[in-house]
Amino acid sequence: MLKVEDLTVYYGKALAVKDVSIEVKDGEIVAIIGSNGAGKTTILNAIMGVIKKNGRITFENVDITSLDTYKIVNMGISYLPDSKTVFKDLTIIDNLRVAFYKSLKTEGEKGFRQKLDGIFEHFTNLEEKIKLKAGFLSGGEQQMLSIAQSLIREPKLVILDEPSAGLSPILVKDLFNIITFMKNNRLTVLIVEQNVNKTIKVADRVYFLKNGRIIAFGNARDFRDDSIIKKAYFGG
Amino acid sequence: MFVQYTINGVITGLIYALIALGFNLIYSTTRIVNFAQGEFVMLGGMLQFYFMSIHIPLAISLFLVSLIVGLLGYIIQFVFIKNTKNPTELSLIILTIGLAMIIRGFTMIIFGKNAYPVNQFLPFESITIFGLTFSSQYLVVLIGALILAGFLFYLLNMTNFGKVMLAVSQNPLACSIFGIDVEKVKSVSFFLSGFLGAVGGSIIAPISFAKYNIGLIMGLKGFSASVVGGFGNNVGAIAGGLIIGISESLSAGYISSSYKDAVAFFIMILVLFIKPSGIFGSKDIERV
């Protein structure tokens, strides 16, 4: 579904990512794991067309390397960046409406309401505050709203950049329940996470990143309790 | 005389309010203060004069004027602002000031430095209210300003596109991530702002004449109205416009018309001292 080939990114003269190749197949959950500054977010930003890069990126066999972000998204990719995507002056329902805006033309208000019902099955705390402006939500609730925004259009591929960052333990549990739900429904997910143990439990395959290079990859179950996790995540 | 001055002030204030709404429209989508806004008003008046002088019917000329100036707004965003390298708020403000000077210069070259009279829109010359006689154009300004303000309120508050415009101003990256063409939304807001300014310029032209250099002062007064009401707040823009328009008219009537232009800026400075966020302005929402 998604193929990243020989991706190299520089920030000015500093090398951020070197010759990274990643593949995400239909229906699988792929995780990228690495310590802070390893280049995880850079890879995601490169895929989404947010930064300049060298290499080739294809989605469903279409070259998306030089496409604008909004065009990549409209091909069926949903992206949750490490910064929140909420609009503080808009209500929760309007935040979700804006996230669904491109599909509103084809699916209409009725389609939006149906998707909303599906979203609120997993985000019950948001449903209770539907008319509240997002600026009044806690940091964790805003993060959950961002996740809800990335899911409402039912994308083909969901890219999540550290979705559990800043969440309370209860919300982290809810988040991984949602990711498990995605997995059970054969949704394709590329995830960058700091919660390594939980991520490896839900992921099908993992890539370990260090200093902008992939140092190991393979089936997630092969790496559970493996020392390479410590190496990639904590250094050494 | 008080009623006469007040009504005069309301009419002028409504035009300032329209300019302020134009400032808000662009600011609320792009966070740019567009100092070419006054030139949209000037162009509206000049083009209205031109089209009426070649006997194009009023409705068609109004449509053409608003379309042309709207497209100019679209081009300003799509060609100049979009392609500015490493844009900052300051660099974009300077850019819009430069564009305003270019528009003014070209208009002077084409139309000259004369002030042109524009015919009133209605077939009758005057209207009488409370025994006082006013130009019938006052009625046009009143109705036109209310329709435009109503349209803007509907667009921004009741439509999905209005919510997208607000979202773009707050988090353009997130909008891109949701598949929204952010540059297109910004260009549409510039088009609407040009449209708004042009209609304002057209309908005020029969009262104030059309001249190449009125954009600067009109733009600054519209900006003052926006600041007084609370920058980015549309109710504030109307209130600010009316406060400045009425104060200006009363000061011209009771003190001296020499001080008329200074009144807007005096009020703006006063508001900045007392309530910097403007009368209707509020602080950003932050959860405590």
Image (cartoon, coloured by chain):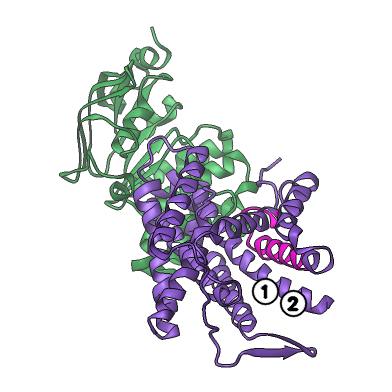
The residue depicted at 67 percent of the width and 65 percent of the height is B238
Q: Which chain hosts label 1?
A: B
The residue depicted at 36 percent of the width and 26 percent of the height is A40
Is residue B242 inside the magenta stretch? yes
Q: Amino acid at mark 1?
A: Ile
**Quadrant of image for the N terminus of chain A:** top left
Mark 1 is surrounded, within 10 Å at the Cα level, by few (under 14), some (14 to 19) or many (20 or more) other residues, namely: many
Residue A82 location (% of width, % of height): 46, 34
Up the image or down, B18 lies above or below A78; here it is: below
In terms of secondary structure, where does tag 1 sit?
helix
| Magenta span: chief secondary structure | helix
Up the image or down, A5 lies above or below A106; here it is: above
Q: Is residue B199 left or right of residue B61?
A: right
Q: CA distance from mark 1 to mark 2?
A: 6 Å
Q: Which residues are magenta?
A: B228-249
State yes or no: discs 1 and 2 in contact (Cβ < 8 Å): yes
Q: Colour of chain B?
A: purple
The residue depicted at 76 percent of the width and 50 percent of the height is B271
The residue depicted at 42 percent of the width and 51 percent of the height is B102
Mark 2 — residue? B7
Mark 1 — residue? B11
Residue B65 is at least partly visible in this image: yes
